[in-house]
Amino acid sequence: MKRLFKFFGSVGQEMKLVEWPTMKQTRKDSWVVVSTSVLFAAYFALCDFVINKLLKLFVLK
């Protein structure tokens, strides 16, 4: 039990040393993640569409 309290005490000390991002930086990072996800989704949808059309053209004739 003593080790558990010591652990949580050290966690609290470390959390005080963390440099948290600002709201502006968080918004910027979130925008990068969302836009990258949308671009990848569009890319894979296009690849899926092209492969599907090629399969229908050559295999499922």
Image: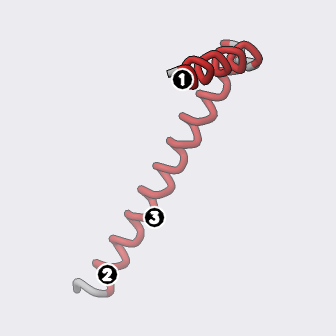
Mark nearer the N terminus (1 vs 2): 1
Residue 41 drawn at (x, y percent): 46, 49
Q: Check whether the beta carbons of the residues at disc 2 and disc 3 lie within 8 A of each other.
A: no
Q: Secondary structure at mark 1?
A: helix
- Tell me the amino acid under the disc marked 2: Leu
Gap between marks 3 and 1 measured at Cα: 52 Å
Residue 42 at what x, y percent from top left? 47, 50
Of the residues tagged 1 and 2, which is closer to the observer?
A: 1
Give the quarter of the figure containing the C terminus: bottom left
Which one is in front in this view, the residue at disc 2 or the one at disc 3?
3
Q: Toward which corner of the image does residue 15 lie, by quadrant?
A: top right
- The kind of residue on which mark 1 rests is Leu
Classify mark 3: helix, strand or loop. Answer: helix
The three-letter code of the residue at mark 3 reads Cys
**N-term mark: 2 or 3:** 3
Name the residue that disc number 2 marks: 57
User: CA gap, disc 1 to disc 2?
Assistant: 65 Å
Above or below for 60 versus 15: below
- Residue that appears at 58% across and 42% down: 36
Residue marked by disc 1: 4
- Residue 54 higher or lower than 21, as above or below: below
Drawn side of residue 2 relative to residue 19, left or right: left
Q: Answer with left or right where residue 59 lies relative to residue 35.
A: left
Up/down of 6 relative to 32, above or below: above
Which residue position holds label 3?
Answer: 47
